[in-house]
Image (cartoon, rainbow, N blue to C red):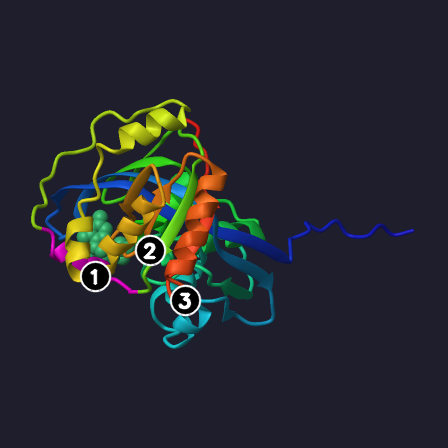
């Protein structure tokens, strides 16, 4: 009896989460001659984020769904949707260069994170697209090549590719894993989109001090105390442009968060809590005070050293 041909079985359906990125600290330490800013930032990631699916199909497509899908659908060529397609295309170029095969793909982006909100959004979606399509097409690229592709797509995409606690330097390309516990967290966004270049432009100083030594270890209490010394240098210009950011931070402080900051260039703010019940109480109170705002109760991913 003839044997069935041996074929490598490719997955037909791959799912990836694009976890929300949270800047626990963001120090702006300088500026390059091309205008990009030099950073010293501490990032972690939530377990929740946008959800993407990649299905082998007859033709390429992108379908948007979720609470913030319609925001992107109004401008399908712009922002996050566009970054997903750009990620697909730069990956294909890299596969062409290394003689690897790929097919058409139907991508679904379930957009649950607010758009232009300082928590990764489009960058996390682009990174999830690189991860997902690498799996769908069973492609092989060196980690360094993938990191370079990510940086081409945006300064935050390399950190989102790793989606674990990191100290980030340069413009976002120098990544150092950080051992850090998981924290209960509440994210609050006053539903005002913020332009990142606009906030960088409004910085009073670009030569601020770097972070110094980080707390380290797995004691949440030591971390929560140590984080208080760190800054987000983009917060003052963002608060000047969007006064609801200071209001959101006030609500979070009143809700007994141990640590409160804005993430990225805003307008999403967050509180870290000592316990899940404390975070749950805060999230419930915030959503009843401001039902028109975005409130997410989640927890961050713990980190291991390299
Ligand atoms: O790299 P990305 O497209 O995400 O950055 C958006 C904008 O934010 C850049 O065009 C630049 O104006 C600003 N930016 C910066 N320095 C960084 C990251 C972003 O000035 N390190």
User: Disc 2 to disc 1, how far (Cα)?
Assistant: 27 Å
Give the secondary structure at mark 3: helix
Asked whether the beta carbons under mark 2 and mark 3 sit within 8 Å of each other, the answer is no
Image position, residue 149 (x, y; %): 36, 50
Across and down, in percent, residue 13 comes to 62, 57
User: Where does ligand 1 appear, by image quarter?
Assistant: bottom left
Q: For this rendering, which residue is in front, 39 or 46?
A: 46
Packing grade of label 2 (10 A; few <14, some 14-19, many >=20) is some
Q: Is residue 129 visible?
A: yes
Rendered-image quadrant of the C terminus: top left
Residue at image location 44% in from the left, 73% down from the top: 70
Residue at mark 3:
81
Q: Helix, strand, or loop for circle 1?
A: loop
Q: Is mark 2 within 8 Å of ligand 1?
A: yes
* Residue 126 shows in this picture: no
Q: Position of residue 225 (x, y in %)?
A: 30, 28
Circle number at residue 153? 2
Of mark 2 and mark 1, the one earlier in the sequence is 2
Residue 120: % across, % down: 36, 53
Magenta span includes 270: no
Lower sequence index among marks 1 and 3: 3
Asked if residue 142 lies left or right of residue 137, the reply is left
The residue tagged with tag 2: helix, strand or loop?
helix
Check disc 1 and report the residue beneath it. 242
Look at the picture and state if 200 lies above or below 56.
above
Tell me if mark 1 has few (under 14), some (14-19) or many (20+) residues whose alpha carbon lies within 10 angstroms of its own.
some
Find the residue positioned furthest to the bottom: 74
Magenta part of the chain: 192-203
């Amino acid at each position: 009896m003839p044997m069935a041909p041996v074929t490598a079985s490719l997955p037909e359906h791959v799912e990836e989460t694009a976890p929300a990125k949270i800047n626990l600290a963001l120090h702006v330490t300088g500026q390059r001659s091309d205008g990009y800013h030099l950073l010293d930032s501490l990032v972690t990631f939530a377990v929740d984020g946008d959800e993407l699916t990649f299905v082998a199909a007859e033709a390429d497509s992108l379908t948007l769904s979720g609470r913030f899908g319609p925001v992107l659908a109004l401008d399908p060529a712009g922002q996050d949707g566009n970054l997903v397609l750009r990620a697909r295309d730069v990956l294909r170029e890299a596969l062409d260069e290394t003689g690897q095969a790929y097919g058409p793909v139907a991508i679904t982006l379930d957009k649950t994170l607010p758009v232009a909100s300082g928590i990764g959004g489009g960058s996390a979606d682009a990174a999830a697209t690189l991860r997902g399509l690498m799996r769908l097409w069973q492609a092989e690229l060196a980690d360094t090549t993938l990191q370079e592709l990510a940086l081409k797509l945006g300064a935050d995409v390399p950190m989102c590719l790793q989606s674990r606690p990191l100290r980030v330097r340069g413009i976002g390309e120098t990544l150092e894993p950080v051992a850090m516990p998981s924290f209960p967290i509440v994210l609050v966004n006053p539903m005002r989109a913020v332009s990142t270049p606009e906030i960088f432009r409004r910085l009073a100083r670009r030569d601020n001090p770097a972070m110094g030594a980080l707390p380290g270890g797995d004691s949440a209490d030591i971390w929560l105390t140590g984080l208080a010394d760190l800054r987000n240098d983009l917060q003052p210009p963002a608060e000047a442009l969007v006064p609801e950011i200071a209001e959101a931070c006030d609500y979070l402080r009143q809700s007994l968060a141990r640590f409160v900051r804005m993430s990225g260039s805003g307008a999403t703010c967050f509180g870290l809590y000592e316990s899940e019940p404390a975070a749950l109480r805060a999230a419930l109170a915030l959503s009843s005070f401001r039902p028109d705002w975005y409130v997410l109760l989640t927890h961050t991913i713990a980190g291991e050293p390299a």
